[in-house]
Amino acid sequence: MSEQSSTPTGLVAFAWALVGLPLVYGLVQTIRTASALFTG
Amino acid sequence: MAVPSFLARERIIAKPGFNRWLIPPAALAVHLCIGQAYATSVYKAALVSHFDSTLTAIGIIFSIAIVMLGLSAAVFGTWVDRNGPRAAMFTAACFWSVGFLVGALGISTNQLWLVYLGYGVIGGIGLGIGYISPVSTLIKWFPDRPGLATGMAIMGFGGGALIASPLSRQLMNWYDPAYDGTIGTTPDGGAVAGLFVTLGLIYLVFMMFGAFIVRVPADDWKPTGFDPSAAKPKAMVTSESVSAGNAIKTPQFWLLWTVLFCNVTAGIGILEQAAPMIQDFFRNGETSTVAAAAAGGFVGLLSLFNMAGRFVWSSTSDFIGRKGIYMVYLGVGLVLYVLLATIGSSAIWLFVALAAIIISFYGGGFATVPAYLRDLFGTYQVGAIHGRLLTAWAAAGIAGPLIVNGVLDAQGTPGQLVAADYRPALFIMVGLLAVGFVANLLVKPVADKWHEPHATTPATARANPERSTTR
């Protein structure tokens, strides 16, 4: 059964961006911190 | 306890064609916020200095929050299942945010008890309700991939600390320019109070966003192309329902409680001591070959593996089964712990690799357990059962640090410990993992006598919760 989506694609993209961007910020910052383990 | 109509479950039943991929970000909006609980070390030294107190007294704030998490998840689990995810997320947002604001008041007025009450008790209640709020909803939206679904949300709890740690340093630097976030500098109390107010408000907005986009599927909804009746029956996956009241009377619940307790206690053993541990393992006399900055990097690396393990291992469990994946967490984890204790000090790369995999299993254990509960007890009251199971986390949060700190205190003075001093604690963890491994082996399908009568559909059960049979 295939249904027409009743959820705006923009809302789904916005929701993922809202949680994804902070997560990317946290990941980048943590990788920078973790790199100290290998660089001294 | 009735909830206002705009929060009621009936108001958030999804229309046909709703895109279920809107639910994971709703869950992540909550878990990324409450995951801040793992980032308290950022301002711990500042609070010790501000209150002229001790690390133990300040550490109690976190301990109260984790104990309240376990207790509130257990107490409010049935309420969460009955009223749905929007009411739960809304309530969690209010408690978590107010917890920060009361905590800020305590710091500003120099009253530590207010921080205990605010962040610890009030915030801890928000933690517990928030942690379980999206779990049963995700399982219902993703009956074809429950491990993936809960892994995504609970990964957010690990990810929350990754965001909160650097963000907190940045905010405290704005409020106290003398603090630059480097080792040896400490922000003043006013900066921590400002941080608490800012985080409280940011988290309120984020969690409310999650609360207002979340939806529950209609009772007869199924993903396109998914036919549970056509799926090959699996012995460890039930199609029956067990109420939360009955679940805690089954041996399966207490075996899983033991599994979670052992897995979490063992993981906390490393997490609690990560920075000093890597320095002590490579200590040469008074100095360590691992610098303080590198030890901080090790903590960051463990955070990454903690988060990644939640998603990767929980998703893997959809293919190899929940019992199988816990045999890996506990069995392979046990072997890795033995290697860490015996040859871990021979090379830094080996130590880091062993610890990172162990911590990924720790995270995986958290993320996989809701799907394990769903397999054994069905989706009917899985949120409430999960809430009760989280008391194992609260107990492990007390037992893990007690074991490690107790052993290390008996072995010598911090700053002079070496790898051999950690061996008794590590071998206690090996014993705990062995207990957990046996408990997991003993898990069998739940006996028929605990199943709900088939007439008790989810809808009728919510309307008449007392109709659920308890034995």
Image: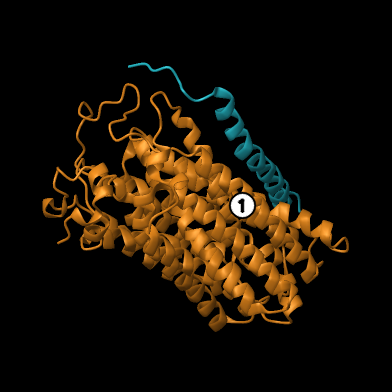
Chain colours: A cyan, B orange
Residue at position x 60%, y 82% in the image = B412
Mark 1 residue element: helix
Q: Quadrant of residue B36?
A: bottom right
Residue B17 position within the rendered picture, expressed as x and y whole percent measured from the top left:
41, 23
Residue B308 position within the rendered picture, expressed as x and y whole percent measured from the top left:
53, 44
Mark 1 — residue? B204
Furthest toward the left, the residue is: B449
Q: Residues within 10 Å of mark 1 (few under 14, many from 20)?
A: many
Looking at the rendering, in which quadrant would you find the N terminus of chain B?
A: bottom left
Q: Nearer the viewer, residue B19 or B395?
A: B19
Circle count:
1
* Side of B283 where B404 appears, left or right: left
Residue at position x 53%, y 49% in the image = B31
Q: Quadrant of residue B14?
A: top left
* Side of B471 where B210 appears, left or right: right
Looking at the rendering, in which quadrant would you find the C terminus of chain B?
A: bottom left
Residue B306 position within the rendered picture, expressed as x and y whole percent measured from the top left:
53, 51
Residue at position x 78%, y 60% in the image = B172
**Amino acid at pointer 1:** Leu
